[in-house]
Image (spheres, rainbow, N blue to C red):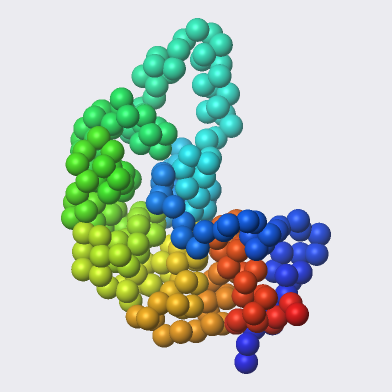
Amino acid sequence: MEATYSRQEAFGADNAVRFIDEVKNPSRTLPADTGIGYLPARRDPRLRRPTMPGGPGDRAPSGIKTPVKKVINVLSAIALGKGMRSFLMDMEPMERAEYYVLNKVSDGYQEAFETFNDYALSTKAQFFLGIMYLQGLGVDVDPVKAFECMENAYKGKNINAAYYLGRMYLEGIGVKKTVYKAVDFFKEAARYEDHRAELELGKLYLENKDVACDKEKAAKWMLKSAQHGNPEAQFIMGQLYKTGTGVKSDS
């Protein structure tokens, strides 16, 4: 029996969420990550660092939320003539290194890389090293090292690594392509409302030849991703409602 979600049930009658079927020339493929999906500490009881930025699974730069207090501090520092460089130097080394990577400050990559290596026992440092190797930020792209670092981060209970491990297993980046492992990691990331992981699960159940087709599961995960603000998922949900695929048709 198929699920019977309606748009009103999914988003609320007064919610002005628009499906991307109203947008011209939509893309079925998300662009490569320009930044880092980063879960806030409050989403994961295992991560209690109050300085951790981000929204659930969002991508930088727009997805990485900078705390208001930090913004005020930056503006205050500039207003006082202190200057951004001086402000950065007042940060703790790890915090400054994270800032360089999250904000793609290329002049700071070498310092960030050295700092993360100095704190290599930290799961957060392993996560960021994985990002640097994966995206070639100040270092040569090295998929194998990227995978090793991400795996170390995940084993150290850093849930932020789960989505990336899923993508790496799905695409065979730094590790043998293993779709069922990708599904497991996406499900783990989805537990913390990572909309990208939810989108990937929806697409896998909908169209991947290595996963048993399950239209209801596809619609369930796609709906979750759409509710968490993923534009591609919103577009796909519009199409699913039109065709009645895994959901009750709007027609």
Image point (36%, 29%), residue name: 105
Image point (56%, 64%), residue name: 233
Q: Please name whichever residue, 251 or 82, is drawn nearer the observer in this view of the structure.
A: 251
Q: From the viewer's perspective, is residue 11 above or below residue 51?
A: below
Give the image quarter of residue 186. bottom left
Image point (39%, 24%), residue name: 91
Image point (30%, 61%), residue name: 168
Residue 206, horizontal then vertical, whole percent: 49, 78
Q: Residue furthest right?
A: 14
On screen, residue 23 versus residue 151, left or right, reads: right
- Quarter of the image where the C terminus is located: bottom right
Q: Please name whichever residue, 240 or 175, is drawn nearer the observer in this view of the structure.
A: 240
Q: Residue furthest top?
A: 81
- Quarter of the image where the N terminus is located: bottom right
- State the count of labels: 0
Give the image quarter of residue 148. bottom left
Q: From the viewer's perspective, is residue 93 above or below residue 30?
A: above
Residue 191, horizontal then vertical, whole percent: 48, 65
On screen, residue 50 versus residue 238, left or right, reads: left
Can I make out residue 227 in this image? Answer: no
Q: Please name whichever residue, 19 or 224, is drawn nearer the observer in this view of the structure.
A: 19
Can I make out residue 51 in this image? Answer: yes
Q: Residue furthest front?
A: 25
Give the image quarter of residue 174. bottom left
Residue 33, horizontal then vertical, whole percent: 41, 49
On screen, residue 171 versus residue 60, left or right, reads: left
Q: From the viewer's perspective, is residue 25 above or below residue 182?
A: above
